[in-house]
Amino acid sequence: RSELRSHRHRSTTGMFVRSILAAAIAASAYSAAVPTPMGSAPSLAPASGRAVRPTLRLKGGEAEIGDDTKISVFSKKDRLSMTLSDFMRERCIEKPNDKDAREMECIMNGVQAACRLIADMVGKAGIQDMTGLAGTGENVQGEEQKKLDILSNDVFKDKLAKTGCMAYLGSEEEDDAIHIAGKHGGDYVAVFDPLDGSSNIDAAISVGTIFGIYKSNGSKSFPLVKGEKQVAAGYCMYSTCSILMVSLGDGVNGFTLDSSLGEFVLTHPEVKMPKRGKIYSTNQGNLPQWSPGIKEYFDTVTNGKGESGQKYSLRYIGSMVGDMHRTLLYGGIFMYPADDKNKDGKLRLLYEANPMAMLAEQAGGKASTGTDDVMKVAPRKLHDRVPIYIGSSEDVDECLKYVNKK
């Protein structure tokens, strides 16, 4: 019996050791097959793009490695994806003597660095005590600041200032524009809402960053220019994933954050907004304060009596980034009309309406104040507000017929 127990003990111990050895070898092989954040190629991946998982064979009590079993770890497409950094670098290669292209690459590097940090903060807000009010009172908009409003603003200011390309920064969270001088001074202006929809943050609903870029042209004070002078615009939505939508004046491209690489990867190339959708997005709680024409528009399209003959549905998140992202991809219309409380509209012209208008128009859509194209409105001050009707071209055109109805 003693010998039998000893035999069983040796057998069990041997099986345990072999299991540990097999697990260690498999883990080592898997790690070698996965590309590092720097993008190095996996040492065990053949040209097919499928990584080889070594298998363990036991011969005479020794382990032997075989390579006859394959496991899909990363496809070739995953490893060769176009990142935002690649995208910007390629533009510089195509225009090797273009200073503006080099500077825009630096600016977009700053933007994506800031968006990565904000995405991380938003994802950890609930477990790192970053929800709730900051206790600093109201900002210049008359809105109570959240903790993440202040943190996101600091991050965006810091990353853009360090690009060495900025002359001025204009933020929703700052009373006045910030002048960048000295060695970090440049010739560009960035206007931004660092965390749009932050009232949603405590409920873990999508929020985002909106930004617009234009040149200062050596101005000695903060330049107030029309949106049509923007050279770049975009937003980053922080939701189930983080998506950075960007226009550099020649279309719209979307990049999704791959947290394993720390890079924004091209996932939405050459975005085109449908000419018409069947969704409208607005705070319909304000309907009683709106004009009879707007009320008639809603009554018409929700009953399927509009130009398309389709019944329209309401979808409203309360974060312009989230609502506009859906509109950009699915079509339809987003609006925030003027009313008795907000006679000039509620959304800010420079860092909300103008960047979104540029994205919409570059994707084939339209953006109007009800009387003028959004990007043709001359701003009077940093925090100017405007009404906005933005989305699919045919939907905006139809809506404006009711807005301007006598």
Image (cartoon, rainbow, N blue to C red):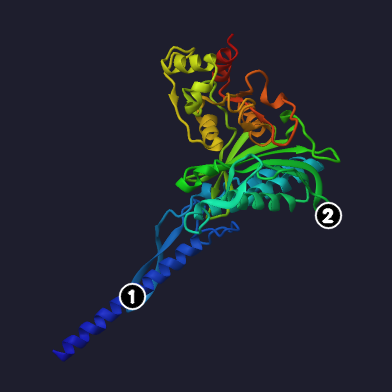
Which percent across, then down, holds residue 268?
Answer: 55, 37
Mark 1 closeness class: few <14, some 14–19, many ≥20 residues within 10 Å: some
**258 and 172: which is toward the camera:** 172
Camera-side residue of 333 and 57: 333
Pointer 2 local density, CA inside 10 Å: few below 14, some 14–19, many at least 20:
few
Q: Is residue 215 left or right of residue 259?
A: right
Q: Position of residue 261 (x, y in %)?
A: 56, 55
For this view, does 93 lie left or right of residue 312?
right
Residue 5 shows in this picture: yes
C-beta proximity under 8 Å, tags 2 and 1: no
Residue visible at 50% across and 29% down in the picture = 283
Q: Residue 385: percent from the left, percent from the top? A: 66, 30
* Marks 2 and 1, the one that precedes in the sequence: 1
Q: Which of pointers 2 and 1 indicates the residue nearer the eye?
A: 2
Q: Is residue 79 in view?
A: no
Q: Which mark is residue 113?
A: none
- Disc 2 element: helix
Q: Amino acid at mark 2?
A: Lys
- Percent across and percent down for residue 281 are 50, 28
Q: Which residue does the numbered mark 1 point to in the structure image?
A: 18
Q: In the rendered view of the protein, which quadrant contains the N terminus?
A: bottom left
Name the foreground residue: 60 vs 194: 194
**Relative to 247, is 47 above or below?**
below
Which quadrant does the C terminus fall into?
top right
Amino acid residing under circle 1: Arg
Measured Cα–Cα span from mark 2 to mark 1: 62 Å
* Secondary structure under the numbered disc 1 in the rendered image: helix
Q: Residue furthest bottom?
A: 2
The residue furthest top is 406
Disc 2: which residue: 183
At a point 49% along the width and 17% down the height, the residue shown is 295
Which quadrant holds residue 95? Answer: top right
